[in-house]
Amino acid sequence: MKSVRNGILAGIMGLASVCVMAQQKTPATTESPVVAGKRIYEQQCLTCHQVDGSGVPHLNPPLIKTSFVLGPKEKLVSILLNGLSGVEVEGDYYANPMPSFEFLTDQEIADVLTYIRSDFTNNADAVPAALVKSQRAAKK
């Protein structure tokens, strides 16, 4: 009888620990900013700027080695937060308006810009989410 009671008690304790473990949050797998940025680029930017970042002549500017991409981070952040229309890039005019992407989180904007600045043969440093956050706050 004692062994049955111990078995039942052990079963209850095991079930209780499973319930407690189920209630604990499992830590989310963290992607690097470049990997997360690539995913966001593929979802939000690829249609206009193309798989290789080459853009579409006279419609959507390229993201390859341009002053917009390699220049001040603040300018890029502003473009994503505010959108852009009718722009000259490296002597060529691009007419397709770019909508605002302010619906993305600060981290998502930082990640996609970090990806753009580090891919497509670009080699520029990362964009911190804190910069996006401060520019978003200043916009209000």
Image: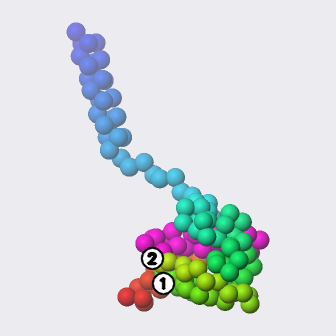
Are the residues at dot 1 and dot 2 in contact (C-beta closer than 8 Å)?
yes
In the picture, which quadrant includes the C terminus? Answer: bottom left
Mark 1 crowd level (few <14, some 14–19, many ≥20, 10 Å Cα): some
Q: Which residues are magenta?
A: 101-125
Nearest to the observer: residue 73 or residue 102? 102
Give how far across and how far down residue 75 sits, in percent: 58, 87
**Residue at position x 30%, y 23% in the image:** 11
Mark 2 crowd level (few <14, some 14–19, many ≥20, 10 Å Cα): some
**Residue at position x 47%, y 53% in the image:** 28
Separation (CA) of disc 1 from disc 2: 7 Å
**Residue at position x 68%, y 63% in the image:** 51
> Is residue 122 visible to us here?
yes
Side of 11 where 90 appears, left or right: right
Badge 2 amino acid: Glu
Determine which quarter of the picture holds residue 61: bottom right
**Residue at position x 61%, y 65% in the image:** 46
In this view, 12 is above or below 120: above
Give how far across and how far down residue 84 sits, in percent: 54, 84
Give how far across and how far down residue 52 sits, in percent: 72, 66
Side of 101 where 113 appears, left or right: right
In the picture, which quadrant includes the N terminus? Answer: top left
Question: Which mark, residue 102?
Answer: 2
> Disc 1 designates what residue?
82
Nearest to the observer: residue 40 or residue 86? 86
Q: Secondary structure at mark 1?
A: helix
- How many tags in the picture? 2
Determine which quarter of the picture holds residue 66: bottom right
Q: Is residue 72 magenta?
A: no
> Is residue 118 visible to us here?
no
Q: Is residue 115 magenta?
A: yes
